[in-house]
Image (cartoon, rainbow, N blue to C red):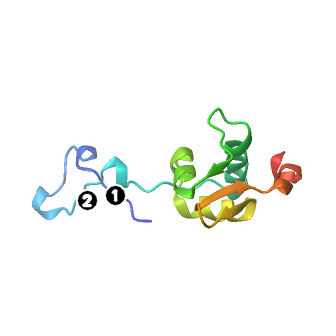
Amino acid sequence: MKEVARVEDIQNPIAPPGNINLVTVSEENERRVALHEDQLKRLVINMFTTDKDAKEAWKVEEMAQRLDQPRQPVKKVMDLLCNRDKIRNVYTLKSTVLTHPWKK
């Protein structure tokens, strides 16, 4: 992953600003680093069961936003732990997941 220098992080540039390629990154577009898969599994299970905002069905985008995680790792975990309702495009937790060692 490339490191990004922000304008506000550079106090005394060595060269004049015309010679430096700066990339302005808004907070919305910053890349998030995904949690380890086991941690993510526990969080997803909690979002279905014990979290204060627990729901029976989640969309991948909602879950990723709520967990503040990248979409792809969340989708991968939800594909493992959930059944997908293709009509409503939501995921529900598989009944076998609650007895699996991931819950520990």
Q: Give the total of numbered labels.
A: 2
Residue in the image at 22% along x and 43% along y: 11
Where is residue 67? Give x, y as percent: 57, 46
Q: Which residue is denoted by mark 1 in the rendering?
A: 4
- Work out which residue is located at the far front of the displayed protein and give it: 87
Residue in the image at 84% along x and 45% along y: 104
Helix, strand or loop status at disc 1: loop
| Mark 2 closeness class: few <14, some 14–19, many ≥20 residues within 10 Å | few
Position of the N terminus, as image quadrant, is bottom left
Q: Are marks 1 and 2 in contact (CB under 8 Å)?
A: yes
**Is 81 located above or below residue 54 in the figure?**
below
| Apparent side of residue 37 relative to residue 103 in the rendered image (left or right) | left
Q: Amino acid at mark 2?
A: Val
| Apparent side of residue 43 relative to residue 94 in the rendered image (left or right) | left
**Is 57 located above or below residue 51 in the figure?**
below
Q: Which residue is denoted by mark 2 in the rendering?
A: 23
| Apparent side of residue 19 relative to residue 85 in the rendered image (left or right) | left
